[in-house]
Amino acid sequence: MEQLDCFHCGDSCGKHPIFLDDKAFCCNGCKTVYEIFSENELTCYYDLQSSPGAVPKEISGKYDFLEDDAIVEKLIEFDDGNLQIATLYIPHIHCSSCIWILENLNKLNPHITDSQVNFGKKTVRVSYHSNEINLKAIVTLLSSIGYEPYISLEDYGSSQKHINRSLIYKLGIAGFAFGNIMFLSFPEYFEVGEFWLEQYKHLFRWLMFTFSLPVVFYAAKDYFISAYKGLKSGLLNIDVPIALGIAVLFIRSTVEIIFDLGTGFFDSLSGLVFFLLLGKFFQQKTYNFLSFERDYKSYFPIAVTKINTDGSETPLQVYDIKKGDRLLIRNEELIPVDAILIKGNASIDYSFVTGEFNAISKTSGDKLFAGGKQTRGSIEIEALQSVEQSYLTQLWSNDIFKKNKEERFTTLTNSISKHFTITVLSIAVIATVFWLFYDASKAMNVFTAVLIIACPCAIALAAPFTFGNMLRIFGKLKFYAKNASVIEQLAHVNTVIFDKTGTLTSSNSSKATYYGEPLTNSEEELLKNTLRGSNHPLSRTLYDILDEHNIISLDRFEEHLGKGLEGASGSNIMRIGSANFVGQTENDNVLTTAVHVNSNNTYKGKFTFSNSYRKGVSKLFNSLKSNFDLAILSGDNESEKENLQKLLPSKTKLLFNQKPEDKLEYIKHHQHEGSKVLMIGDGLNDAGALAQSDVGIAISENVNVFSPACDAILDATKFNEIYNYIKASKSAINIIRWSFLLSFFYNAIGLYFAVTGQLSPVIAAILMPLSSISIVVFTTITTNWIGRKLK
Amino acid sequence: MSVIYILLGASIVVAIIFFIAFIYAVKRGQYDDSYTPSVRMLFEDEIIKDKQKPTINE
């Protein structure tokens, strides 16, 4: 039989597709969405992109907290009593169909006046009449068409986000002034001494002066501030010579036009600032759709359902949860606090925390940690702590999360600039002293000329353009770095530390090994068919691993929640589950996850599960071992120790049973010994280690879902390439060194003119852009060349 | 040759008009999202088609 793909979501329809209008659907959910669209004449959705949809999820009750006005108020960005505007983050936005359908929301509900998608940020900004439709109805509508918004604690109270556009303004102003000043200064470049030019040159000069004012006092403002801050803390950063250069250019030019000594250097001044800002702009490449600043807040819900003593349910903001509160956690909801399970059978997925995808069964009375996600039915829990005091969230009270990582490093540019500034100042002083004796009238001219021409525009541009371009190349290869300094730090790393679960192991596939008496064919058939009826994650995994068998209908099937399964066909009875359930005492290796099998009341054996390691782990470690210290920090028990020792080079340090704080401390300890640490992890339990390390890379199976705060996000498929990325970062540093050499060469030429007192505005106007542009060209070509070698 | 004052004035006024337009555009958020408008631009046809249909249905 031909396999059909769902018309709506593109998934395989399986053996029983649902048909409507000659179109196949995989489930009723997808069919319903199609019906909604076809009723409202919106089937164009399917023309723009084939199968663009997502299966709508069951959300009943999940967004009840949106009825609470106090909570809604914190989420919306505008409210005038009738018209409300809210921006919702929708992870599913991925193609042009998504944009089209979301911008036509008003066809589905006329009370929505306008909706606008920001594709890069995956948000939709919805305006609606709040008297007719509330936010909950909009969220429900979006969910019903497969676009469920993601509302987390992070959104709470941060609706008034300030967008910083000052760099665009500054760049615009500098570019505007640069262009106009170029036109005005052009006639005087040739100094023809023509009559009309002589007549009007003063006007031209004062116009140039006027244009340069906003450039110096607004566009170049940050350089002065940064230089001042640097000097105050005793640092000669790159902004010191730049600020000096800009100040000297402006003052000398102003003096020249006041006393009619010359045209000044307004063209070079505005050009310099324009190029510098361009470099900043280029470096500022950010990945809108990724967030590198996530803490637990972006995982946690805004509100949960509280069960009052009289049995009624009310939504409760999570910060208001107090010890002893009784909470209702529905299917697919996250547990926000450490709690005790009171009622119901929990199957908790801690993948947010540990990176491990196996759900763990809990029975009433068990302790549940914050951060777990309930995956089966509803449960009732009693809070043991408030949100901030929970085991997981406590980690964020560590000081490391308050520090700005970039301030902890001295960049290559700044370390060069120290020597550079001192050299330039000495040259200026020596040349001035020489001219004071030789021809005192030119001394001041030479002093300022040296400072002007040595202004390290090209040096300041080398790093932004190299790293900026590298960032873009890495981004294409699905390695998303937060900013340029990450690449610089990556090049200096000498210790690499990995998390185990979810990082070295792939969460998509796990392996099961069978120990015990071999099963007969009919037993295996019964086993497979019994598993077929269960939705427990372990059953699903085992079902997928076992060989294909005939589907037989069971005479009896029972699922004992938290214990195991029982299936019967004919005279054969099969019991699968925990050791106790199949009548075996739990004595053997308790370190592994196992499923025991009992056929016709005789114990057969067990399947033990182990995570399979990513392909190429061994190869990666072997290529890393000669240049780096390697270590593995795992929060798990030691069951995998032997496997890892076989797989990895012998010098790799293996540490197990590491708590999140332990990981952080371990890295701190290494840093005190002078190591530069690269941490590669994935779950929230690595968040502390990622923040403490010099470079923290989060591995992600799907970059659109959430990864903890880090410096870079790496797509899991590119895991093997880490070593090549480190090598490429090292090459980038070499490119910058070469660019410095190139710019020193230009500076030497410029200094010759300056020291000999021959620097005219036209030479400065040629030399400064020329050096800047050639640096940009050089770094772009070389980084692309390195990028071509990467996979 | 005094006409140069008029020419200069005119050219600067034009330049400043464009400059103000730029500032206004940034302020309105036109530079915040540089991708979606490029896709949205291509939708015009479908929306017109759809706007006509509901009136026939209702």
Image (cartoon, coloured by chain):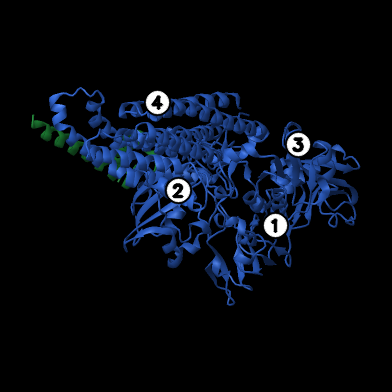
Chain colours: A blue, B green
In the image: residue A604, left or right of residue A176: right
Q: Secondary structure at mark 4?
A: helix
Chain for disc number 2: A
C-alpha distance separating marks 4 and 3: 75 Å
Residue at screen point 90% across, 52% down: A588
Image quarter where the C terminus of chain A lies is: top right
Q: Secondary structure at mark 1?
A: helix
Dots 1 and 4 on the same chain? yes
Q: Nearer the viewer, mark 3 or mark 2?
A: 2
Q: Secondary structure at mark 3?
A: loop
| Mark nearer the N terminus (1 vs 3) | 3
Chain for disc number 4: A
Dots 4 and 3 on the same chain? yes
| Mark nearer the N terminus (1 vs 4) | 1
Q: Which mark is residue A550?
A: 3
Q: Amino acid at mark 3?
A: Asn
User: Residue tagged by mark 4?
Assistant: A770
| Mark nearer the N terminus (2 vs 1) | 2
Q: Which mark is residue A226?
A: 2
Q: Amino acid at mark 1?
A: Glu
In the image: residue A286, left or right of residue A440: right
C-alpha distance separating marks 2 and 1: 35 Å
Foreground: A512 or A623?
A623
Q: Amino acid at mark 4?
A: Leu
Q: Which mark is residue A383?
A: none
Picture quadrant where residue A482 is located: top right
- Number of marks in picture: 4
Foreground: B38 or A22?
B38
For label 3, count other residues whose C-alpha is less than 10 Å away and answer few (under 14), some (14-19) or many (20+).
few
Q: Nearer the viewer, mark 4 or mark 3?
A: 4
Give coordinates of residue A106: x percent, y percent.
35, 48
